[in-house]
Amino acid sequence: MNKRILLCDDEAHILRAAEFKFKRAGYEVTCARDGQEAWEILLESRPDIVVTDCQMPRLNGLQLAERIKQSPDTNGLPVLMLSAKGFELSADELRERFGIRHLLAKPFSPRELLERVEATLASEEATREAEVYV
Amino acid sequence: MFERRSLSLLPMAVLAVACTALGLAWVVEPLVAPVSLQVRVAFVIGGAALVMGAIKVALRQAASAATAAEQYVARLCELDSDALHEEEQLDRTPVRREDARWRELCQRVRSRLCEFARQADEVEMVRAGVEVRLRRVTSERDQLREILTGLSDPVVAVDAFGEIVVANGSAERLLNLSGTNQGSRALEQLDRCQELLSLLTETRRRRAPAQRTGELTLASADGKEHCYRVSCRSLAQQTEGSAGSTERGAVAVLTDISSLKAIQKRNAEFVSSVSHEMKAPLSSIRAYVELLVDGEADDDATREEFLGIINNQTDRLQRLIDNLLNLARIEAGVVAVNKVPQSLNERLGEAVRVLQPMAESKDIRLVAEFSELYLGVLADRDMLLQAAINLITNAIKYTHRGGTVIVRSRLHDKETIFEVEDTGVGLSPEDSQRVFEKFYRVRKDREMAQGTGLGLVLVKHIIEDVHGGRIELESELGRGSTFRAILPGLAQISA
């Protein structure tokens, strides 16, 4: 079964480029233009991974990630973040507080983003299998 | 000396001799001659009368010398120093030469008085000199105190005993120092600000003269937090009793650097915004270039679409950089402003002509409603045109197809006004407040048109800072906006 990915960015061109890349890689892609829209989509369907921009209207990337982490329905859903801004928070803090697995700086390479997403999904898989085995 | 005294004694000596002779005659009468008793008595009485008269004359003479001397001394006592010196020169002692004792006394008194007068003159000169110096020092001190009091920078000085000796008004207000008796204020009163206290104490305890600086944050009287840079220096004063001690006085000057900090923060935010604004088109360019390079676009249509996006985003980047440079150059005053009297209507007409094709392509009616009067403005031609173009472009961008944009000009109260009214999307009150901020773009309208968030900033700068006018904005969400530029009229400028 195809992996499902939710892409979230307020820049239409960025969204289009990422969507194109993931569709070509065989993903089932859903797009959202801001955090709020992404959250509404998440309430209805459950993707395998979320890639979100940070600065967005209504609900920003960090708020979205926090909401995903705090809600029992979505907790554990891997989130990758793209950002044009540097962060004061360390990678550990981002993971602990917001459940963000990885931070990619803009301008980003779609190829690298795809690799990151696959690696994250693979490690998720491995963890799940390990849990099942235990 | 002897001669004078003998002269005054002469009559008395004659009388004494006469009396002695008569006495002898009385005693030796039987031996000498048979003179009658009456004659002898008459002799004795006559002699005695003579003696009495002589004594009286002598006494009167002595008394008159004493009186003269007394009067003279009294007069001397009343003289001022100049008259005393004159008296000394001329020697007008009213005592006769014969009364040598009184004369000498008078002269001694006079010379002592003259000496005192001389000493008094010297003392007076010294006193006058001291007074002049004191007056100078006092005025200098008052001047320094006034300067110190007038300083907006708080200044606090402590002496070697750890007591606050100087604290100007702003320091008192900032540090809550109470009491006007400065000497009694211990350093510990600075407990409101431990950093300052420790900085002053540390500086005082240094063996060698020291200068230390620090930064601290304090809430000022208005309740706002202010950031201060403290410059602390030891005072090389030698106070009595402190000679042996290693402690000195110290002075701390606090400089409010809040505005500097705010500028630094704004600059950092600006750089951050600029880089964010630049990264957005760069991200797209990089992503699509990579997709193309990786051969992800199979068909010509997709390739064309990607190339179109790349082209588009490159333009966006170019526009952003141009606008940034323009704004930076105008703000820094690098661009020469060449203000000449000119017709506002002409410039507006030019702008409308330039933008007519843009309006037509969006099916928007661009209407010019200019005043029939000649509206003279003292302005830089290019900048004024740029401001008009930016306002009209903005109106066209945020007005839907089929809408109307009206450019008006008029004279009102000697002010020259031009306004751009549209039937566009309008602005919320919050957005109206922020629309002149750098890089601010109304989120919900971002997709309507491309922009850098710098166009209106530039307009505001050109109208207000360069031309001394002002910008007004009336807007209603969903109904449209009117941007109004008010420029001082020519008559107003020359008045």
Image (tube, coloured by chain):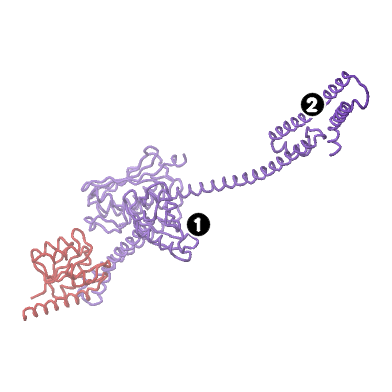
Label 2: how many Cα within 10 Å (few below 14, some 14–19, many 20+): few
Q: Nearer the viewer, residue B433 or A97?
A: A97
What colour denotes chain A? red
- The N terminus of chain B, quarter of image: top right
Q: Which mark is residue B56?
A: 2
Q: Residue at x 15, y 72 (%)?
A: A23
Q: Position of residue B371 (x, y in %)?
A: 36, 40
Specify the subunit that label 2 lies on: B
Q: Residue at x 78, y 34 (%)?
A: B92
Q: Nearer the viewer, mark 1 or mark 2?
A: 2
Q: What kind of residue is marked 2?
A: Lys
Q: Is residue B411 left or right of residue B63?
A: left
What secondary structure is marked by label 1?
loop
Q: Which mark is residue B240?
A: 1
What colour denotes chain B? purple
Q: Work out whether B171 lies above or below B7.
A: below
Q: What kind of residue is marked 1?
A: Glu
What secondary structure is marked by label 2?
helix
Residue B86 visible somewhere in the drawing: no
